[in-house]
C-alpha cells in the first residue's frame, strides 16, 4: 500500500486547513495532495516529536507498524512460550511482528531471503532463529527451528513459504493474513498443483483460525500503538531499518525490487531536495 509523506511550513493562510508535516489518509490509503488545494474528504495526520526520524511515519510508526501491532495482538494473540513465525521478517511489518512477539514472551522465528537478512533478523532484531527461504532445505530448517510446532504464523508471503508452514501449525493456531507477495504476479502455484483442498483440510482438522485483514480495520488502535511502539523504540526494545532510494524517477524500479525482495527494511523513495530540513510539530 503506497504512502506519501509531505513536509512543509504552516502559514496563516493555511492554519485552518493544514499542519505540516503530515501524511494523507483516506480510507486506509495515503493520498497525494497539493498545499492549499486539499479537498475536505482528506484526513490529515499530524506528526509529533515521537516520529524521529520523521520517515518512521511511513514505517515502524506508520501503516506497516500498525499492521504488525494490531494484526499480531488482535488476531494472533501470542502467549508466553508460544512459537510465533513471520515471513518477510527483515521488512517493516515482519520485523516488528517478531520483536513484539518477544516482548510478549513468545519465541520468534523469522523467515527471510539471504544470509544478510537472516543475520539482521537474528543478531540485530533479537529473533530466536532466522530461516533462509532460499535454502534448498528450507522446509526442514523451519521444522527444526519449531520443535513444538507453530502457534501463530503471521502471513505476508504465501507460496512455498506457506506450504512449509502449514504442516507445522498446532491445534488452534492463529494465522493473521495481510499479504501474499509471492502470488501477486503469479496467482498459480509454481508446481501447478491446486493446494487449496489440502490447505482447507489442514485448517479444519487442526481448528486453525485464519483471518485476513486490512489495516484500516484497526485504525482506532493507532493512539495506543503509537504510545507503545514509540516507547519500545526509546527503550531500545524495538529496532528498525529503512531502505531509502533517492529520486522519484527510481520509484518504478524500487517498487519492482520490493516485490522481488531486493529491499532491505522499509522501502522509501526520497523525492525532495537534499537540503530540505524536516521538522516535527
Image: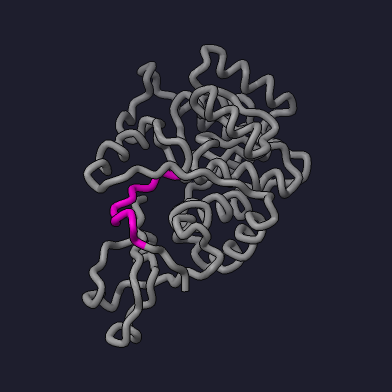
Does residue 268 belong to the magenta stretch? yes
Q: Residue at x 33, y 70 (%)?
A: 8
Tell me residue 78's x, y (percent). Answer: 69, 46
In the figure, residue 14 lies in which quadrant?
A: bottom left
Is 38 displayed left or right of 134 in the figure? left
Does residue 81 belong to the magenta stretch? no
Tell me residue 84's x, y (percent). Answer: 65, 38
**Coloring applied to the structure:** one colour
Q: Residue at x 44, y 72 (%)?
A: 46
Q: Give the extent of the magenta segment.
A: 266-276
| Residue 198 in sight in this render | no
Q: In this picture, is 142 found above or below 207?
A: above
- Comparing 207 with 158, the one in front is 158
Residue that sits furthest to the front in the current view: 275
- Comparing 265 with 128, the one in front is 265
In the figure, residue 204 lies in which quadrant?
A: top right
In the figure, residue 29 lies in which quadrant?
A: bottom left
Is 162 displayed left or right of 244 in the figure? right
| Residue 242 in sight in this render | yes
Tell me residue 98's x, y (percent). Answer: 62, 41
Amino acid at each position: 500500500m503506497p504512502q506519501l509523506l509531505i513536509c512543509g511550513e504552516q502559514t496563516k493562510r493555511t492554519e485552518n486547513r493544514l499542519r505540516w508535516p503530515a501524511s494523507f489518509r483516506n480510507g486506509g490509503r495515503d493520498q497525494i495532495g497539493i498545499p492549499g488545494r486539499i479537498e475536505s474528504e482528506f484526513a490529515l495526520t499530524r506528526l509529533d516529536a515521537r516520529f524521529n526520524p520523521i520517515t518512521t511515519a511511513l514505517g515502524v510508526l506508520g501503516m506497516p507498524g500498525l499492521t504488525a501491532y494490531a494484526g499480531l495482538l488482535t488476531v494472533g494473540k501470542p502467549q508466553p512460550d508460544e512459537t510465533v513465525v513471520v515471513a518477510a521478517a527483515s521488512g517493516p511489518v515482519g520485523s516488528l511482528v517478531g520483536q513484539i512477539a518477544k516482548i510478549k514472551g513468545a519465541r520468534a522465528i523469522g523467515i527471510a531471503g539471504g544470509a544478510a537478512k537472516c543475520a539482521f533478523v537474528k543478531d540485530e532484531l533479537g529473533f530466536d532463529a532466522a530461516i533462509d527461504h532460499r535454502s534448498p532445505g528450507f522446509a526442514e530448517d523451519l521444522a527444526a527451528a519449531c520443535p513444538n510446532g507453530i502457534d501463530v504464523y503471521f502471513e505476508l508471503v504465501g507460496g512455498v513459504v506457506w506450504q512449509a508452514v502449514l504442516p507445522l501449525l498446532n491445534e488452534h493456531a492463529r494465522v493473521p493474513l495481510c499479504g501474499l507477495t509471492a502470488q501477486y504476479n503469479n496467482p498459480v502455484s509454481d508446481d501447478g498443483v491446486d493446494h487449496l483442498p489440502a490447505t482447507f483440510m489442514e485448517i479444519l482438522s487442526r481448528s486453525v483460525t485464519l483471518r485476513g485483514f486490512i489495516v484500516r480495520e484497526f485504525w482506532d488502535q493507532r493512539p495506543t500503538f503509537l504510545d507503545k511502539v514509540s516507547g519500545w523504540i526509546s527503550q531500545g526494545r524495538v529496532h528498525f531499518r529503512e531502505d531509502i532510494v533517492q529520486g522519484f524517477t527510481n520509484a518504478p524500479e524500487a517498487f519492482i525490487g520490493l516485490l522481488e525482495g531486493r529491499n532491505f527494511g522499509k522501502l522509501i523513495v526520497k523525492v525532495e531536495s537534499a537540503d530540505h530540513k524536516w521538522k516535527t510539530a
